[in-house]
Image (cartoon, rainbow, N blue to C red):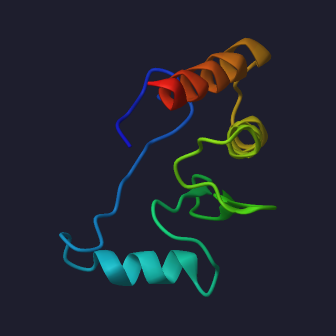
Amino acid sequence: MKNSPLFEDNYEIIAIATDKMEGGQGMFDQMKKDRSGGMPWMVILDGDGKELTTSVGPEGNVGCPVKPSEVDYFVEMIKSTSSSNEQRLEEIRKALMERKSN
């Protein structure tokens, strides 16, 4: 995921390429543990490395959210871990839904 203006004021986005980065698979395995879900799989950590939430929602891994329920869960991840206001959250929701229709 590229850094996006919708996220850059709240997050530092780091992508781990499990097949291209030395130690990438080990880091992925350590973070994901035994949880379900394919890729992409996301975890949001606080500044001390403590897990706040993951992309595994009530219906499974939202990875790259497309369905409305996946978008809802992703927006909830952002809401619960950032200082994003309702306007920013709506911008994120809209951007995800527009991507779906393209």
Of all residues, the one furthest to the bottom in this rendering is: 34
In the image, 55: left or right of 98? right
Q: Residue at x 64, y 58 (%)?
A: 55
| Quarter of the picture holding the C terminus | top left
Judging depth in this view, the residue of 24 and 57 nearest the camera is 57
Whether residue 42 is situated above or below residue 13 in the rendered picture? below
Q: Position of residue 66 (x, y in %)?
A: 59, 41
Judging depth in this view, the residue of 84 and 100 nearest the camera is 100
In the image, 23: left or right of 88? left
Quadrant of res 57: bottom right
Judging depth in this view, the residue of 63 and 80 nearest the camera is 63
- Can residue 43 be seen from the camera position used here? yes
Judging depth in this view, the residue of 61 and 84 nearest the camera is 61
Q: Position of residue 54 (x, y in %)?
A: 65, 60
Q: Residue at x 53, y 31 (%)?
A: 100
Q: Residue at x 61, y 87 (%)?
A: 34
Count every numbered label the image shows and give the total. Answer: 0
Of all residues, the one furthest to the front in this rendering is: 101
- Can residue 9 be seen from the camera position used here? no
Whether residue 24 is situated above or below residue 26 in the rendered picture? above
| Quarter of the picture holding the N terminus | top left
Quadrant of res 95: top right
Q: Position of residue 86 (x, y in %)?
A: 78, 17
Whether residue 77 is situated above or below residue 34 in the rendered picture? above
In the image, 64: left or right of 14? right
Q: Residue at x 71, y 43 (%)?
A: 81
